[in-house]
Image: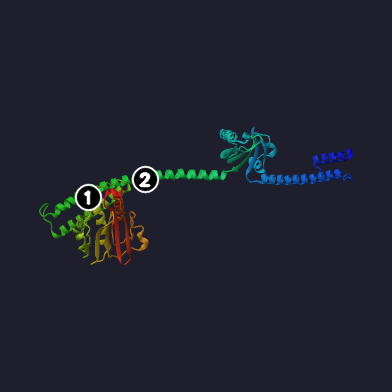
Amino acid sequence: MSKNIKILKDALDEIAKGNFSVTVPADSNPEINELVKSFSWMSESLKERIDHLTESERKYRNLYDQSLDMCRIVNAQNIILDCNKAYAENLGYTKEEIIGKTIFEHDADFSLDAHRQMIETWKKEGKVLNVEIWLKRKNGTTFPILLSSNGVFDRDGKLVASNTIIRDITEIYQARKKIEENEALIKKQLEELKEADELKSQFASMVTHELKTPFVPIKGYCEMLKEPGMLGELNADQMEAVMGIYENSLRLEGLIADVLDAQKLDMHKMKFKFEDFGVDEIMTMVTKDLTSMMKDKQIEFVNLTKDTSNITADKNRLYQVLRNLVGNAVDFVPENGRIEISAQSNGNDVIFYCKDNGIGIPKDKQAGLFKKFYQIDTSVKRKHGGTGLGLSICKGIVEGLGGKIWLESEPGKGTTFYFSLPKSREEKA
């Protein structure tokens, strides 16, 4: 019995040394023999488990060492216990030079405070996620990283170490820096554009004012010359010349007014005077005042408005929109053509329209019609003049009054411009 026990003890010592191939011979004593069988089973089972643990450790070590992210294990005293290949290579050290050193030795000087604060958070909460700090390589260069750490605890729940994953975000940082630089550049350019726009507005205001100054006496003297006997008698040729000057002065007056209105709309400085008036009242006024525009081309001008409801709006600005739309239609309607205007209630709104049987507008040209200075025909020989501000001014006024404007057109079949306005200011708000 003593001999068998010694054999088992020697076998256990061999197993303790890692020699799992040791065997214990069978014995004639049944009880000893059962003990030998149990020993052999225990030895095989222990060997399998240790082999499994060894394989798992090997896989983990391969995964840890071959990870593209930098990894390190740090104890509670901030000493590096282990690191992977990526960590050592990124910092320019060997693993032997890193292990045993404090984590702060690899920090950029300006990042030390942030790292220490992160360590305090880790000790309180047991983990930190995506903290941005800067590391310093052996050659002195620095680079930004994103750091996350999970705590390692002992059986008593005491924090003893951390597993840390570090990701180099140099490319992200450079991209972010580029975006910030671009944003700063865009901001500066916007400020310069605003300044240039303000200077442009000031220049436009100055030019239009200076144009109006000589325009007033030109128009005034023409009106005086037209009156018989005021400044002497004029023959037919002289009167024709005066009328030409007068008509062109009126055209110039309209151009100056368009530039001023466009400037006011751009700067959101156009003022509106709201008052109550009848829809049929404004449409009758437009028909009466603009009929004379139809004489040269013998255009039929029809007002189909039957709506007698009231609207609260700026009467003069509404008249200006209608006059612009009718004047625009006159330019594009053939001789003996037809222009039709009307207004009709539609719920809380009033829908106005100006319809003509002119040449129409191609689909690809319609989208730009309400833009400033837009001309369907921009050639030097184009038949129709103007600044290209009329429709953009109409749009600005209509929207300033709380409405919207649109059109329907087909080449060869004419064009209809529509715009809607709320009946009251409360409906607009």
Q: Amino acid at mark 1?
A: Asp
Q: Quadrant of residue 241?
A: bottom left
Is there a contact, CB below 8 Å, between mark 1 and mark 2? no
**SS for tag 2?**
helix
Q: Which residue is mark 2?
A: 196
Say which of 245 and 159 sits in front: 159
- Residue nearest the observer in this picture, 111 or 6: 6
Q: Quadrant of the N terminus?
A: top right
In the image, taking residue 383 as reference, residue 295 lies left or right, namely left
Q: Secondary structure at mark 1?
A: strand
Across and down, in percent, residue 98 comes to 67, 37
Residue 337 is left or right of residue 157, and the answer is left
Number of labelled discs?
A: 2
| Residue in view at x 17 percent, y 50 percent | 220
> Which residue lies under the disc numbered 1?
276
The answer to which quarter of the image holds residue 376 is bottom left
